[in-house]
Image: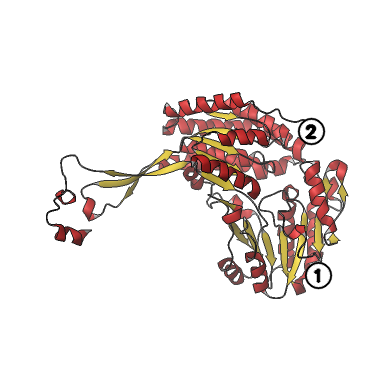
Amino acid sequence: MATLENTPAARISEIAASQKAYFRSGATLSEPFRRTMLRRFDAAMVNWEKRLCDALWQDLHKSPEEAYLTEISIVRGEIRKHLRHLKEWMRPERRPTPLKLLPSKSRIIKEPLGQALIVSPWNYPVQLLLNPLVGAISAGCTAVLKPSPYTPTVARTLEAMIREIFDEEYVAVVQGNREVNRRLFDLRWDVIFFTGSPDLGRTVMEAAARTLTPVVLELGGKSPCIVDRGADLRVAARRIAWGKTLNAGQTCIAPDYLLIHRPLLAPFREAYTRALRKLHGDDARQSPFYVRMVNDRAFQRVAGYLTQGKITAGGRTDAAERYIEPTLLEEVDPAASVLHEEIFGPVLPVVPFDETREAVEFITAREKPLALYYFGTEAAGRDVLLHTSSGGACLNDTIMHIANEELPFGGVGNSGMGRYHGKESFDAFSHRRAVVCAPRRFDLPFRYPPYKGFRWVKKIL
């Protein structure tokens, strides 16, 4: 796989300086400008669809169908939503004015934060770079985009697309490895939007702290999946198998481990095996819809988990293809790394429990996850949500909360901070500025020394 050349430091500084001047010119502020850029963006997503899909196949063996569903359609849906609601979101919000400030008026105006830096990972390299860009454009920001070098074909394709539709003083792409990330984080930005691992998130936050730059951190972690009494095992197995094998498990909100009511383990195992067969056939390696590990290092890491328990489904690998079969792993030592590290692959370790409270205690003893999935009765699921915390959740499903652009997406604690999608994306790149507009000719005398009638003033304060 060909590597990307690092964008030179001088070139990065040149782009950042030109974007700062462009933003200060006020060119990005008007609604017509933002709307025009969003429409141009949407048209490009149509024109570049095949090239983006081809690049995703080249780097990840991702089928055109999955590429459209999990990458392109999400970006286009986000653009359309912003076009529908941009005027409403930009409109100043009136707020009540207390008696002590009358006859002033109070409102909140939405102003762009300014220069945005958006850094994305490799697992959904189109969606996770371009979806935040929709919010940056909608809010009136400029943006520097940094795609992952681990999907170089996609990164080059995205750079060519962005260069075709936007001037670099407005939106630009820079390429390279973590050294380029370090150079970017050393510069002053008005907002940093980072998607990646918690460890890298700490590095971003440390760099941002030096300049007090606001950050949105979309991180990851070990998202638990509970199968409890009352679960429909056929439905649960199918939806968990789909969520776990989507992008070969290389999804930040994939079910990371399975907590299951002990009597349900054997029938679930059978249902899960059947579900995998229906999704990917008898040999997932032959399926045109089954993704590969992104690189040899990822393959070796995930394949290493297969030795940490008893394989009861799947388990076959092919290093030459970076292929790992969807695998169910049982009888896992609680101290094993597969139960402590984010797997980011199609291996699903199983932990049986006797009472639901045991599953809740297992989850709450660990860092807060990006997602939590519960299969069982809705009432029991609501109780589990009450006693746990996660960025998002599904009852009797997996993954699908990300598909609703009306819901915010983001983490909590170790799994991230800030949120986006829909209006949340507009807000992520905006500052809500409080404004009091006072009349010029009328002035309340009580605020000035010598504070005449102060005992009456106290009654209205």
| Whether residue 42 is visible | no
As measured in the structure, the alpha-carbon distance from the residue carrying label 2 to the one carrying label 1 is 42 Å
Question: Residue 429, position in %: x, y?
Answer: 49, 41
Residue of label 1:
266
Residue 99 placement, left or right of 142:
left
Residue 205 circle label: none
Question: Residue 178, position in %: x, y?
Answer: 67, 37
Q: Quadrant of residue 99?
A: bottom left
Callout 1 amino acid: Ala
Rendered residue at 75%/52% (across/down): 245
| Whether residue 82 is visible | yes
Question: Residue 49, position in %: x, y?
Answer: 66, 34
Rendered residue at 68%/65% (across/down): 226
Q: Quadrant of residue 143?
A: top right
Foreground of the two, 342 or 274: 342
Q: Is residue 390 above or below residue 320?
A: below
Q: Answer few, some or many: residues within 10 Å of disc 1's Cα (few below 14, many 20 plus, some between 14 and 19).
A: few
Q: Earlier in the sequence, mark 2 or mark 1?
A: 2
Secondary structure at badge 2 equals loop
Q: Nearer the viewer, mark 2 or mark 1?
A: 2
Is the C-beta separation of discs 2 and 1 under 8 Å? no
Q: Quadrant of residue 61?
A: top right
Callout 2 amino acid: Met
Q: Answer few, some or many: residues within 10 Å of disc 2's Cα (few below 14, many 20 plus, some between 14 and 19).
A: few
Residue of label 2:
1
